[in-house]
Image (spheres, rainbow, N blue to C red):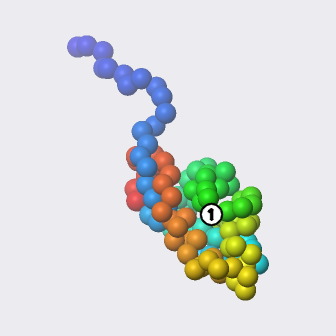
Amino acid sequence: MGAKARRPAGPPARRAIQLRYLAHARSGDKGDTANVGLIALQPAYYPILVKEVTAARVARHFKGMLTGAVDRFELPNLRSLNFLLHGALGGGGTLSLKTDAQGKVFSTALLRMEVPIPTDIDV
């Protein structure tokens, strides 16, 4: 009887998936800053959000739409992340000529961002 072939050690297989399958989101505004909350749909998804949805990655996702920085806050007891997108609203609701001067669609736009997840995660 021959030796069993061993699979080479390496990182686990991964696939890309939109955040809408892992979380739901809400957004709003305060002046020229959009506020986006990202809430894990299942407890097992929260560590993926923490690892993959960084402030830098969110800033890249909204490139060209922001004039300021992105701040991220972790709320592990709520399995949530909160993002402040500075300079996102063209001056704010009363000053902006943007069609979404209150930042309501930023949550939907963030949920379209793709992140890698292990293939063994059931979504």
Side of 15 relative to 99 (left or right): left
Using the image, determine if residue 103 lies above or below residue 66.
below
Q: Nearer the viewer, residue 107 or 3?
A: 107
Question: Residue drawn at (42%, 39%), measured in percent from left and top?
Answer: 13
Q: Position of residue 14 (x, y in %)?
A: 43, 43
Q: Nearer the viewer, residue 81 or 96?
A: 96
Q: Which residue is mark 1?
A: 65
Judge the density around disc 1: few (<14), some (14-19), many (≥20) Cα neighbours within 10 Å: some
Which percent across, then down, holds residue 6? 36, 22
Please give left or right for residue 29 compared with residue 38 in the image: right
The image quadrant of residue 73 is bottom right
Q: Is residue 97 left or right of residue 30?
A: left
Q: Quadrant of residue 17?
A: bottom left
Identify the image quadrant of residue 59: bottom right
Q: Quadrant of the C terminus?
A: bottom left
The quarter in which the N terminus is drawn is: top left
Q: Which SS class for mark 1?
A: loop
Q: Position of residue 116 (x, y in %)?
A: 48, 48
Residue with the most extreme bottom position: 94
Residue 9 sits above or below residue 56 on the image: above
Q: Position of residue 50 (x, y in %)?
A: 63, 54
